[in-house]
DNA sequence: ATATTTAATGAAAGCGCTTACAATTGGTCT
DNA sequence: AGACCAATTGTAAGCGCTTTCATTAAATAT
């Protein structure tokens, strides 16, 4: 492997000067710069970022923890981050936490051992205190999709409550009064918050929330179908069902059809997230947009600004959900 | 930041010994090991992997280049890799190539500068020669979804031709003879190969391939819809359409419905890839399974075996597509 | 008890870079 | 021409670890 030393000898300068042209720091006369560049090319020099990181105490690497890699959700988020980071020549070290506290902590620890300059965390199992503590220790991190008051500047989150509200509000607006709800896992913040918003909308319309019209799923398509079957079995009629995410909504749609119900003529369905396949369904799924790519981009901007000082300060800490109207909702007959 | 030196002083041993307990190399008496561990905990020591990498000339990091991060395809692939790698305490540095030669090369170069022990590449724009050359320079890499004869041991690919064949074969088997084809971008190998398989199946059934029943899309849902409209406009009747991926198939299904055609009664549709939302469509999309997670896992096994010598040799270089029967195909009326 | 192995530790030389700081060069101004 | 300042380059001390080799301690053999 060619080193900076060899390049410096070939170019007849000191290694400090070679370092200067590589990093474009300090002042180097154009003539010597060319000399160095020529030497690098001739020797086939490849910069050793590991050594540079050790010496400079900077890795230009961002650690990223997400629950899972499969599915389209986290890919969209990371895609937003990557695009913004690439322009600044930063790289991403990716790890999955599997919504398990031990794994999440181990992954964060591993990323810190690798001296990531900053972390972007979509973690679900680790406690607020743990994260607050990290920040107090001086770890640069952004928490995504989670709000923690003590470190609110480090958080970027969606107003899940509002999203839940918006979905129910839409169904109410077009005339539904008997509205079922298929919730996500209620041990997750998203699951609870979306349901809370749903209840608020019902309340504001003077409709009492009925526990027997709620089914707790687990955010997977299958549980959406199971939810419909369970709900129907309870015998309580409903003309619309709000689901805590699009996967469950698609499962619900299929189950409804299997039971001979038409969507939206017999039952309206609304999802949450607006994942890419929502528009592929037929009819297209009415849903609540979770601007996931935008959140990923904002996390990147936070890091660029706060950690590398290249900021344009282009970020907000709370993003707004909004209704995406497609074909799975209509007024009750 | 606490260093190995400070730990060694606190524990009353040399830094070499501390290094030995951290890496579990060499022989350390149980008693001194405990001493060291206690000192590490007391001081809150965090191993500096960057320094370790420089000294050992190993980063335990695998560089990963994929075309894009969004969509569910690459997430599934990386998920397979991550799971296998995590068990071996390796990490993934992720970069996107955007199917652009300049970007792909720059990303590969960047990952090499960061001294990744190995690369996993899903690249589309870079030439075969370029990759062969890298291998000859001693770069450890796996090329995914691409076959290059000179470095066949470094390749893991799907038999795309066979997949295309299987899809058409299925349509033929259930009685279709007028079969349209919506191709992927034909400047990509996948696009060409899948179409080639399609043609072969037609040929083997004694049916002549008709250019006017082929539409070149671009792998996006929208182009599937456009394909249907273009095909219908040509006036040539068809009772089935094979699509080069699931996104286009879903676009095609929606366009067919908009034009008053039922799927599968009027027109059968078959996709390719078996992405996660294929089963969410209604009816479920009949498609060709591309075992993407498995491919990701195999890439990891290749690296573990060839680069770290932890191999169980659990990998094959070619994976087989297979038919997934759901509800979008049926015999013509 | 002494010689011979083997296990456990330490000393110290890097790994390839960055970055004060010092030294040199080349102008510019009186 | 002499003084002064800015631009350019070099010197050398780390960054925090791994690893070879030498050394010492412990175990086994004779």
Image (cartoon, coloured by chain):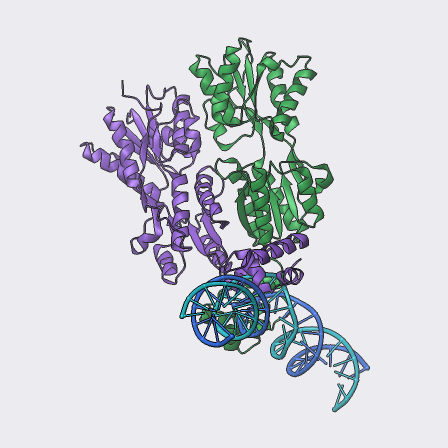
Chain colours: A purple, B green, C cyan, D blue
Q: Is residue B281 visible?
A: yes
Q: Nearer the viewer, residue B34 or B51?
A: B51
Give the x, y percent position of residue B309. Answer: 67, 53
Residue depicted at x 44% and y 41%: A80
* Residue A258 placement: quadrant: top left
User: Where's residue B330, x and y in %?
Assistant: 54, 16
B252 vs A152, left or right, is right
Q: Quadrant where the N terminus of chain A lies?
A: bottom right
Based on the displayed image, in which of its 4 quarters is residue A48 positioned? bottom right
Asked if residue A198 lies left or right of residue B313, the reply is left
Q: Going by the picture, which residue comes out furthest to the left? A: A206
Q: Is residue B54 above or below residue A165?
A: below
- In which quadrant of the rendered image does the C terminus of chain A lie? top left
A165 to the left or right of B238: left
Residue B291 on image: x %, y %: 58, 35
Q: Nearer the viewer, residue C14 or A206?
A: C14
Residue at screen point 55% across, 9% down: B237
A115 or A48: which is nearer to us?
A: A48
Q: Relative to A209, does residue B205 appear above or below in the rendering?
A: above
Q: Is residue B54 left or right of residue D21?
A: left
Name the residue at 43% across, 48% down.
Answer: A99
Residue B141 vs A136, above or below: the answer is above
**Residue A271, x across and y down, in percent:** 36, 31
Which of these two is toward me, A206 or A282? A282
Q: Residue at x 57, y 49 (%)?
A: B110
């Amino acid at each position: 492997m060619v080193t900076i030393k060899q390049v410096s000898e070939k170019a007849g300068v000191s290694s400090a000067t070679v370092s200067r042209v590589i990093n474009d720091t300090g002042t180097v006369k154009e003539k010597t710069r060319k000399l160095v560049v020529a030497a690098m090319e001739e020797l086939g020099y490849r910069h050793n970022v590991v050594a540079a990181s050790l010496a400079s105490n900077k890795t230009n690497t961002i650690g990223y923890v997400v629950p899972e890699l499969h599915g389209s959700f986290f890919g969209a988020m990371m895609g937003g981050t990557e695009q913004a980071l690439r322009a600044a020549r930063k790289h991403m070290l990716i790890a999955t936490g599997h919504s398990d506290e031990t794994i999440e902590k181990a992954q964060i620890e591993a990323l810190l051992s690798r001296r990531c300059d900053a972390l972007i965390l979509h973690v679900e199992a680790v406690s607020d205190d743990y994260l607050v503590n990290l920040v107090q220790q001086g770890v640069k991190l952004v928490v995504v999709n989670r709000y923690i008051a003590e470190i609110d500047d480090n958080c970027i989150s969606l107003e899940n409550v509002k999203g839940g509200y918006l979905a129910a509000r839409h169904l109410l607006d077009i005339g539904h009064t008997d509205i079922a709800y298929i919730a996500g896992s209620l041990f997750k913040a998203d699951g609870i918050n979306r349901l809370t918003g749903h209840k608020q909308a019902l309340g504001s319309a003077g409709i009492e929330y009925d526990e027997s019209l709620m089914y707790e799923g687990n955010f997977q398509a299958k549980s959406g179908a199971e939810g419909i079957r369970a709900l129907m079995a309870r015998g309580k009629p409903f003309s619309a069902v709000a689901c805590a995410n699009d996967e469950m909504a698609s499962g619900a749609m299929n189950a409804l059809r299997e039971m001979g119900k038409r969507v939206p003529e017999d039952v309206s369905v609304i999802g949450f997230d607006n994942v890419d396949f929502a528009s592929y369904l037929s009819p297209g799924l009415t849903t609540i947009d979770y601007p996931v790519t935008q959140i990923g981009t904002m996390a990147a901007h936070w890091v660029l600004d706060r950690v590398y000082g290249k900021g344009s300060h282009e970020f907000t800490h709370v993003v707004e959900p909004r209704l995406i109207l497609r074909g799975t909702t209509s007024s009750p007959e």
